[in-house]
Amino acid sequence: MSVVSDLHRVRRAFGESAAPWAVTTHDVGEHHWTAFSGTQQIDYNIALVHGGDVQVLVAAAMAALADHGVPGLIMLAGEGLSGAQVMADAGWVAARAMPLMRRPANAGVAADDVREITPADLPRTRELASEAFGLGRELAGAVFTEDLLARDDVVFGGLWEGAPDETSSMVCCGLLCRAEGTSVGWTLATDPARQRRGHASRLVAGVKHIDAGTRGPTEDLCLASIPGAPLYEHIGFERLEHWQVWTRPRWMLGAS
């Protein structure tokens, strides 16, 4: 498989993996995808354009966000980068670039302090997301739901610190969504007071072990922040390309 065709496959797989939380709109085309939660959280109403008739696809993504009345992000990759001028002319701005990263098929590593989140754990999960990403509790509650936990294409795991009784506390959580042949990380949140202690690396390994127990080893994908990329490189991910992230200036304060 050529490098170009492999990137095409990976981009599509990433979009396919958004199905569990993109409950308002989820559409994966040959050269684009859209994934809208319908909430007022910018990071959960997103689209990618990576080829095809770029001007038409970019315009359609902007129109879809406007129709839904929600803030969001439109990402450009590969041939889709030629749509930058279309977005600039419409008053959008390039907010950042994010590395698309991949790790070869693996089965993770069992971790005693990592387990799947239950409905009873959702309040703490939403609290962690609020603290890590600046989400309001109401927005976190709209994304992290019991319906999400019940899906068979999701592993939502948490890492607990402390004794295995009522004194232990969840300090890190992560959402792994499944697409054919891949496992994609969408959320990784650590208590700000407990960061830089190796919790995130242990959680990623433990959640992947749970996932692999069901489906066997698969490759991993993630779209990392620039500061977060070294963490993923440390545990075996490589950078494939960078996605250019565009939004409207008035929405930028809502981006994590």
Image (spheres, helix red, strand yellow):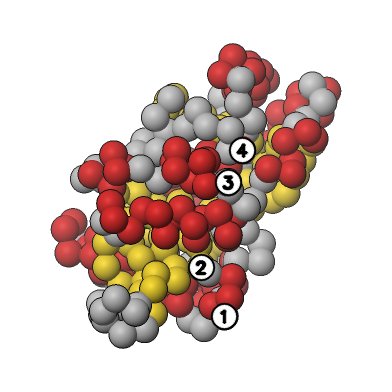
Q: Which residue is mark 2?
A: 190
Can you identify the residue that label 1 sits on?
A: 196
Instruction: Give x and y (percent) for residue 15.
Output: 44, 38
Query: Given the image, on which type of amino acid does mark 1 rest?
Result: Arg
Q: CA distance from mark 4 to mark 2?
A: 20 Å
Residue at 45% x, 71% y is 171
Whether pointer 3 and pointer 1 mark residues with C-beta atoms closer than 8 Å, the reply is no
- Give how far apart the Cα atoms at labels 3 and 1 are: 24 Å
Nearest to N terminus: mark 4 or mark 2: 4
Q: Is disc 3 placed on a helix, strand or loop?
A: loop
Residue at 61%, 38% (x, y): give it. 42
Label 4, secondary structure: give it.
helix
Q: Which residue corresponds to mark 4?
A: 42
Where in the figure is residue 65, as x and y percent of width and height? 60, 22
Q: CA distance from mark 3 to mark 2?
A: 16 Å
Measured in 3D between alpha carbons, the distance from the residue under mark 4 to the one under mark 1, in whole angstroms, is 27 Å
Q: CA distance from mark 4 to mark 3?
A: 12 Å
- Return the residue at label 3: 136
- Lower position in the chain sequence, tag 4 or tag 3: 4
First reached walking from the N terminus: tag 3 or tag 2? 3
Q: Earlier in the sequence, mark 3 or mark 1?
A: 3
Which label lies toward us, 3 or 2? 3
Q: Residue at x 58, y 60 (%)?
A: 132
Upstream in sequence: badge 1 or badge 2: 2
